[in-house]
Image (cartoon, grey):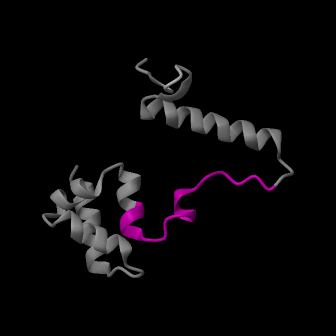
Amino acid sequence: MNLQIIKSVEGKVEYVLLPIKIYDALRVEIDKALKKKDKSSDYVPFELKDYVDNPVALARINAGITQEELAMRMKVTQAYVSKLEAQEKVTAKVLKKIKDALKNK
């Protein structure tokens, strides 16, 4: 396992960086434990779609790529991808281009 520990100036451990696969597995286990522990509460697991409204940004984040990478796949600039992600509405034509770009990993 490849973990990186980041210490404060005083030498105290403050952060641990770990591979995304381990993070995802831990997140699933934490969600299960929280649901089991507090079935009657208002616990709601984190869902990215609850916080990201733009379909371009949501698709890109779910694919695990940067704006730069999506831009390269679409043969556009990163600034254009950023502009798309800032829009309230995105056309079906643009969404198809995004889907095609993400499909061709």
Q: How many marks?
A: 0
The answer to whether 98 appears left or right of 8 in the picture is: left
Q: Residue at x 75, y 52 (%)?
A: 43
Q: Is residue 6 visible?
A: yes
Q: Is residue 95 visible?
A: no
The answer to whether 1 appears left or right of 99 in the picture is: right
Q: Position of residue 76 (x, y in %)?
A: 15, 67
Q: Position of residue 47 (x, y in %)?
A: 57, 56
Q: Residue at x 31, y 50 (%)?
A: 65
Q: Position of residue 56 (x, y in %)?
A: 36, 67
The answer to whether 48 appears left or right of 85 in the picture is: right
Q: Residue at x 81, y 39 (%)?
A: 37
Tell me the quarter of the picture where residue 92 sits: bottom left
Of the 4 image quadrants, the one containing the N terminus is top left
Q: Residue furthest right?
A: 40
Q: Position of residue 27 (x, y in %)?
A: 58, 38
The answer to whether 28 appears left or right of 52 in the picture is: right
Identify the magenta region. Answer: 42-58
Q: Residue furthest front?
A: 10
The residue nearer to you, when weighing 93 against 81, is 81
Q: Is residue 11 above or below residue 95?
A: above
Q: Is residue 22 above or below residue 38?
A: above
* 50 within the magenta span: yes
* 43 within the magenta span: yes
Q: Residue at x 66, y 41 (%)?
A: 31
Tell me the quarter of the picture where residue 61 sits: bottom left
The residue nearer to you, when weighing 45 against 11, is 11
